[in-house]
Amino acid sequence: MAKINLKNLKVEAKKGIEKADNLKDLDEIFRKYLGKKGKITLIFNSLKKLPLNKRKKLGREANLVKIGLEKLIREKTQKFKEEIRAESLGKEKIDITRPGKKVKIGHLHPLTLVQREVEEIFQSMGFSVITGPEVETEWYNFDALNIPKDHPARDMWDTFWLKVEADQRARLPSPESKASGGQGYQRGLTQKFLLRTHTSPVQIRYMEKHQPPLRIIVPGRCFRHEATDASHEIQFYQLEGLVVDKNISAANFRAIIEEFLKRFLKTDIEIRLRPSFFPFTEPSFEIDVRRKKGKWVEMMGAGMVHPNVFKAAGLIPNAPAGGWQGFAFGAGLDRLAMLKYKINDIRLFYSGDLRFLKQF
């Protein structure tokens, strides 16, 4: 009976192996016949109850069946593994004819791109690029620019005033005007400090140390304590320009700024000058620009340098012999970028939103 059961089990197990569709089915067949509680294993466990001659014969036949089934299961297992590997390779193989994925790398901020382009245009017209400190004294930011204390014009600039200790003052830039009678450093120790509200203080600093003729631009960050909206931020970038020479007029300014805007916007443009007021220029005017009869857009403020500004820097203005005159202008680099790229909200530049920044 045991011999007949062994033959039946062999036939039954072979059919199960042949019908197995995956590794899981093979594992179940192995446990069913060859596992610790499998049917072949139970036959081996029952041999001790048989006489010695039958035990040897049945044990030898059971062992042959076991070896045969193990071989069939190994071969079927290897076949399944090869099929799985071939399928995996088919999915993961690399098509070397396909273009590779673009590597994501950092790139320049749109304001940096605009600043570099602006600098390049003005440098091609003979201007030098100058920088100055962002922490300024009240004298450079206001007094030297013809905006004395209690002057109503100070209301035009919402200022971030700084509380600076005595030991810190010695490390901050102090006034050294030639017009100060050598008292610039001492005045600096008693001056109030602030985050500069415009780049105009660099005009004074540069004229103190350089003799005309002068032709400079000053790009840099400025700060104003005001509510933010689509066109205002508490920090922004400004472009200051200054030309000092003999026989300089507003016509010279118009020619230079019109040439700059044509190159920057890469199209034909019209500009117009409207009367305005700035304490450090006289006369003063606003400059509007438009593309091909489009809408006028206010672009910058400008004017002829006020005589008091020259005096504060130690230059002699409008003298019969050796006198100097010139013009100055200030434009927001953010506004130039908004006009160039047709952006309607200045806050996007400072949002850190990569969806916006990746477009440039």
Image (cartoon, grey):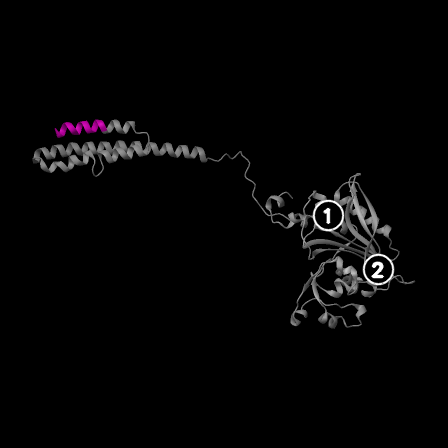
Marks 2/1: CA–CA distance: 26 Å
Q: Residue 351's spot in the image, x, y percent? A: 62, 49
Seen in the image, is 302 located left or right of residue 111?
Answer: right
Relative to residue 208, is residue 97 depicted above or below? above
Q: Which residue is mark 1?
A: 336
Seen in the image, is 254 located left or right of residue 47?
Answer: right
Q: Quadrant of residue 77?
A: top left
Q: Is residue 220 magenta?
A: no
Seen in the image, is 220 located left or right of residue 9?
Answer: right
Is disc 1 placed on a helix, strand or loop?
helix
Residue shown at 15%/38% (left/top)? 45
Q: Earlier in the sequence, mark 2 or mark 1?
A: 2
Q: Residue 334's spot in the image, x, y percent? A: 70, 49
Crowding near the residue tagged with mark 2, few <14, some 14–19, many ≥20 C-alpha atoms within 10 Å: many
Query: Which of these two is toward me, 110 or 353?
Result: 353
Q: Quadrant of the N terminus?
A: top left
Relative to residue 275, is residue 30 depicted above or below? above
Crowding near the residue tagged with mark 1, few <14, some 14–19, many ≥20 C-alpha atoms within 10 Å: many
Q: Residue 187's spot in the image, x, y percent? A: 74, 71
Report the magenta residues as a range: 1-12
Q: Which residue is mark 2?
A: 306
Q: Quadrant of the C terminus?
A: top right
